[in-house]
Image (cartoon, rainbow, N blue to C red):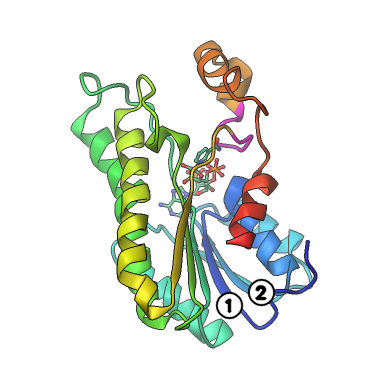
């Protein structure tokens, strides 16, 4: 950590009840930011807040895929902390609905809505209020959005969408002095992946064996997010 480099800064982190989002929220809070941590899982979100003890840390139970939620989340940060400097669009769901021939419309719609449309809507709600210049948005894409893997059509399309939405936002928001970046993690050990890391032979063979540094930790991604 680098002391309190985020003192006086206000941040929203979505999907902060566990995994990468929890690590990001704790990292920003640990370095002095005032954080609004958002998730649908109330008990685990409270646990995150307990871990952030001593920080200026608020929680909000919300479904970020709900079309009305983003405005409320941003209002909460403005009310709690008087401004908004950073948004980490982390919340996501895994999609194991198969390839194009297997994926149902329901799977496709749910994964695209959660993993890319909610990122668009959270960003749209935050942008008018982000500090200009100096505001930051970090989105969590995935290696699935960069390389083709079997059986994950919807998840991969959504994460590629996050990567391209990010490039588009760079073009639109850069001139206002807002930095927008995406991180594309490989395999990180979180509640989303633990079961697959332990029991899925294909996942181990295709994903982990081909990753020179092996399975990462949520803190690895939090460190990158904080530097961005
Ligand atoms: P995680 O452990 O499942 O944490 C994500 C959190 O977001 C969970 O608490 C989840 O609740 C919550 N969430 C899901 N839908 C939500 C919604 N509609 N509104 C509010 N909160 C919601 O996942 P993670 O592994 O930390 O992943 C974080 C991000 O990194 C995701 O976007 C994921 O796609 C991406 N990613 C992860 C990996 C990896 O290897 N772990 C690799 C590349 C990219 P539920 O548990 O109830 O869904």
Asked if residue 118 shows in the view, the reply is: no
| Labels 2 and 1: the sequence-earlier one | 1
The residue shown at (22%, 23%) is: 100
Q: Secondary structure at mark 1?
A: strand
Against 185, residue 35 (above or below) is: below
Residue designated by label 1:
10
Quarter of the picture containing the C terminus is bottom right
Range drawn in magenta = 188-194
Q: Label 2 crowding class (10 Å Cα cut-off): few <14, some 14-19, many 20+? A: many
Relative to 127, is 194 above or below?
Answer: above
Residue 168 sits in which quadrant?
A: bottom left
Q: Is residue 123 left or right of residue 19?
A: left
The extreme bottom residue here reads: 82
C-alpha distance separating marks 2 and 1: 6 Å
Q: Is residue 170 magenta?
A: no
Q: Is residue 91 above or below residue 26?
A: above
Task: Give the numbered dot on residue 33.
Answer: 2
Residue 80, quarter of picture: bottom right
Q: Position of residue 195 (x, y in %)?
A: 58, 25
* Residues at circles 2 and 1 in contact by the CB criterion of under 8 Å: yes
In percent of the image, x 69 and y 48: which residue is there?
219
């Amino acid at each position: 950590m680098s002391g309190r480099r985020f003192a006086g800064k206000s941040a929203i982190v979505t999907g902060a009840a566990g995994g990468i989002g929890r690590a990001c929220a704790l990292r920003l809070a640990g370095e002095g930011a005032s954080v609004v941590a958002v998730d649908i899982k109330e008990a685990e979100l409270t646990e995150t807040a307990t871990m952030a003890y001593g920080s200026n840390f608020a929680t909000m139970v919300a479904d970020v895929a709900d079309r009305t939620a983003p405005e409320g989340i941003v209002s909460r940060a403005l009310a709690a902390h008087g401004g908004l400097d950073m948004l980490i669009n982390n919340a996501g769901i895994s999609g194991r609905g198969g390839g194009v021939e297997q994926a149902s419309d329901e799977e496709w719609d749910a994964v695209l809505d959660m993993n890319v449309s909610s990122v668009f809507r959270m960003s749209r709600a935050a942008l008018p209020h982000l500090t200009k210049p100096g505001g930051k948005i970090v989105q969590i894409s995935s290696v699935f959005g960069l390389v083709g893997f079997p059986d994950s059509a919807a998840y991969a399309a959504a994460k590629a969408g996050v990567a391209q939405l990010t490039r588009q936002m760079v073009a639109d928001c850069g001139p206002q002095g807002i930095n927008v970046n995406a991180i594309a993690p490989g395999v990180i050990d979180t509640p989303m992946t633990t079961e697959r890391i332990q029991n899925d032979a294909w996942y181990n063979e295709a994903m982990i064996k081909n990753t020179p540094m092996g399975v990462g930790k949520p803190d690895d991604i939090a460190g990158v997010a904080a530097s961005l």
